[in-house]
Image (cartoon, rainbow, N blue to C red):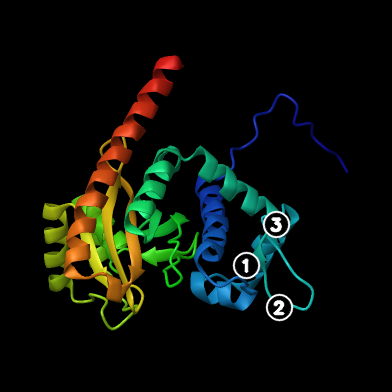
């Protein structure tokens, strides 16, 4: 038996497409945990992503070994691990929009007495990144990190209204699933609502994402002029009277503009000191 040395011989490059596909599968598995139930099993992930159970199991074991996922005794499933939590916390600390939005959303909460929120655009969905809870006994709170479709609720609609046309059309071509009986699922009706939102710079929802909840939202524009998320005022629907909504429209619009200006100033000041 003989062997040949590989010294001085260029190895064949790995298949870039194969590597990209594998990385995409890992990312897709992790993203399921970001917006789904706390625990997910091999079978559920396999069905959702259209992957074989063997492939899913290998991905899960790799993620567990790096503490991105974890298991608990007596529970048949996987959950996000400590490393994933650390990544999320680090991302929030480094997200400039959250830095500049925090004092403004706290002030807005104090002015309105209602919960204020910050959402980020993730792919073709949105995720709650932060909230400042109302001091009232009866109030609305949101699930940080949970993903929601863009067609349901004011925070999603106001992002969708300001997306580039091709991305907006991609969302509108999908089946628009109802989250409540008030969710707009008719494409023509949604187009009308989005056009009004684009004109007004503000979206309103009365029970569209969550039954009994009212909200008013404005887009979160970055220094690049693109929409990166949204901010909202939200609370029990019965408190969102026409008079309250009119007041909140002006407040949320002004807050959005202030965040954009401060974000731009922060970006420019950091660039100048580099």
Lower position in the chain sequence, tag 2 or tag 3: 3
Q: Viewer-nearest of labels 2 and 3? A: 2
User: Does 135 sit left or right of 246 as displayed?
Assistant: right
Quadrant in the rendering for residue 44:
bottom right
Disc number at residue 164?
none
User: How would you rate the neighbour count of disc 3 (Cα within 10 Å): few for under 14, some for 14-19, many for 20 or more?
Assistant: some
The location of residue 14, given as percent across then percent down, is 59, 42
Answer yes or no: is residue 52 visible: yes
Lower position in the chain sequence, tag 1 or tag 2: 1
Extreme residue in the right direction: 1
What residue did someone put label 2 on? 76
Identify whether 160 is placed above or below 257.
below
| Residue appearing at x 35%, y 34% in the figure | 263
Helix or strand or loop: what does disc 3 sit on?
A: helix
What residue did someone put label 3 on? 62
Helix or strand or loop: what does disc 1 sit on?
A: helix
Answer yes or no: is residue 207 visible: no
What residue did someone put label 1 on? 56
Extreme residue in the top direction: 273
Helix or strand or loop: what does disc 2 sit on?
A: loop
Instruction: Give the spatial CA distance, label 2 vs label 3.
Output: 18 Å
Identify whether 80 is placed above or below 120.
below
| Residue appearing at x 59%, y 72% in the figure | 52
Q: Viewer-nearest of labels 1 and 2? A: 2
């Amino acid at each position: 038996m003989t062997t040949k040395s590989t010294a001085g011989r260029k190895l064949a490059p790995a298949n870039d497409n194969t590597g990209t596909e594998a990385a995409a599968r890992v990312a897709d598995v992790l993203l399921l945990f970001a917006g789904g139930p706390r625990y997910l099993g091999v079978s559920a992930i396999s069905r959702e992503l259209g992957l074989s159970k063997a492939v899913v199991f290998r991905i899960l074991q790799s993620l567990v070994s790096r503490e991105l996922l974890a298991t608990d005794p007596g529970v048949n499933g996987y959950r996000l691990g400590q490393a994933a939590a650390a990544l999320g916390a680090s991302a929030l600390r480094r997200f400039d929009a959250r830095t500049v939005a925090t004092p403004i959303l706290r002030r807005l909460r104090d002015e309105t007495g209602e919960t204020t929120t910050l959402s980020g655009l993730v792919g073709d969905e949105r995720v709650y990144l932060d909230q400042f809870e109302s001091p009232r006994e009866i109030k609305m709170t949101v699930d940080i990190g949970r993903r929601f479709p863009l067609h349901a609720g004011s925070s999603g609609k106001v992002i969708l209204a300001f997306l580039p046309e091709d991305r907006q059309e991609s969302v509108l071509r999908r089946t628009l699933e109802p989250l409540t009986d008030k969710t707009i699922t008719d494409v023509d009706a949604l187009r009308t609502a989005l056009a009004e939102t684009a004109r007004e710079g503000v979206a309103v929802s009365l029970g569209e994402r969550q039954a009994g909840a009212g909200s008013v939202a404005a887009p979160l524009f970055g220094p690049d002029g693109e929409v990166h998320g949204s901010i909202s005022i939200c609370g029990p629907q019965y408190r969102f009277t026409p008079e309250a909504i009119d007041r909140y429209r002006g407040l949320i619009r002004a807050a959005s503009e202030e965040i954009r200006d401060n974000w731009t100033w922060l970006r420019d000041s950091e660039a100048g000191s580099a």
